[in-house]
Amino acid sequence: MSLIHRDRLKSNENRFSDFSYMIDEVLMQRTSPFQEIAVVQTPAFGRALLLDGVTQITEKDEFIYHEMLVHVPVSYTSVLNHVAVIGGGDGCAMREVEKYQEIKSSTLCEIDPNVISIVREYFGNILENTFTDPRLSIIHEPAQKWIESQIAGSYDLIINDSLEYEPGDALSEELYGEEHLKNIYTALADSGVYATLAVDVSPGAANNVNQELLATIKERIERVFDSAFVHFFPAVSYGWSFMTLIVAIKNPALMPPKIDEIWNRWKKRGIDTRFYSPFFHVASLIDPSKNYKSLYDMNMD
């Protein structure tokens, strides 16, 4: 895809969004063996990273997505020694993971090393010391191959930060397929948790289709895991949409903690966030495309 100065660029060129924004300047553009990579300067969102023309992160709002992607599933477990992120070469999810001092090791499985080198050059202001943390190991190979090679019970938390589900797409079907999910299940410890991005469920003409896709993904996960829960959160640079996060629990005895337990763990850990909080954790369990009144009229006591 060619990017043109001061043109409008779609944030997500699939069925889920027709939102676009202005760009001021193309800062870099490179074709790797895996994809087209670009960094652009925008008046609304600052710098943005695009892969094959689709927005991955922006300076102004990436923290919303990545804080929810990491801190929500962490709250489902009290054991957090070994964590893996699939995809996520932009480093932002791993930045949030590394805030937990009890983690002994973290693994980032990103197939394209070019993504990491580019974000280190252009997004150092939001990455802090992510890629220099001594606990971090980086693997450059397909996620399916990597997860198959992992020893059973190796991880307490595995996060899928690769691609949004697109029915019919071969890679998407594989990453959201039963065989891959079974390999993830095996790689998790008995108290392990799996979290994955799902789809956009914003109100609009496509919402019924998206709700069906969300139900399909959740059903696939529940064939492998004992329980799965859907969380909703805003994604501003994706057109003021609501993204979905599915959190799956391996052990049925470890049901989602109650709000007071979430608060206690959160306070004890002392993690610094800009968006996530235990209150929003609970609120995110409500589907905003169906129940706006419930979301805003929750009892605050």
Image (cartoon, rainbow, N blue to C red):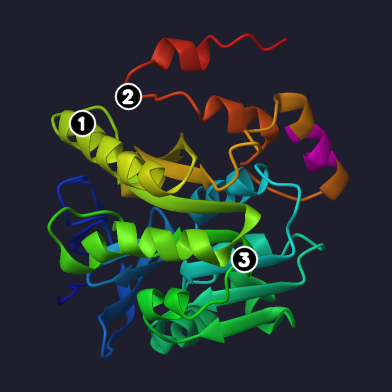
Q: Quadrant of the N terminus?
A: bottom left
Q: Are marks 2 and 3 in contact (CB under 8 Å)?
A: no
The magenta segment: 262-267
Where does the image place residue 69, in percent across and percent down from the top left? 53, 51
Kindly report which numbered mark, 3 or 1, lies closer to the viewer in this rendering: 3
Pointer 1: what residue?
207
Residue pushed farthest right? 268
- Amino acid on which disc 3 is placed: Gly
Q: Residue 241's x, y, as percent?
A: 33, 38
- At 46% across and 23% down in the image, what residue appears? 286
Residue 59: x, y in percent? 49, 61
In the drawing, what numbered circle is on residue 289? 2
Give the residue type that dot 1 points to.
Asn
Determine whether, in the image, residue 118 is placed left or right of residue 150.
left
The residue lying toward the viewer, choosing from 189 and 258, is: 189
Q: CA distance from mark 2 to mark 3?
A: 37 Å
The chief SS type of the magenta part is helix
> Which residue position holds label 3?
153
- Residue 204 located left or right of residue 108: left
Residue nearest the observer in this picture, 141 or 161: 141
Badge 1: few (under 14), some or many (20 or more) residues near its Cα, within 10 Å? some
Circle 2/circle 1 CB separation < 8 Å: yes
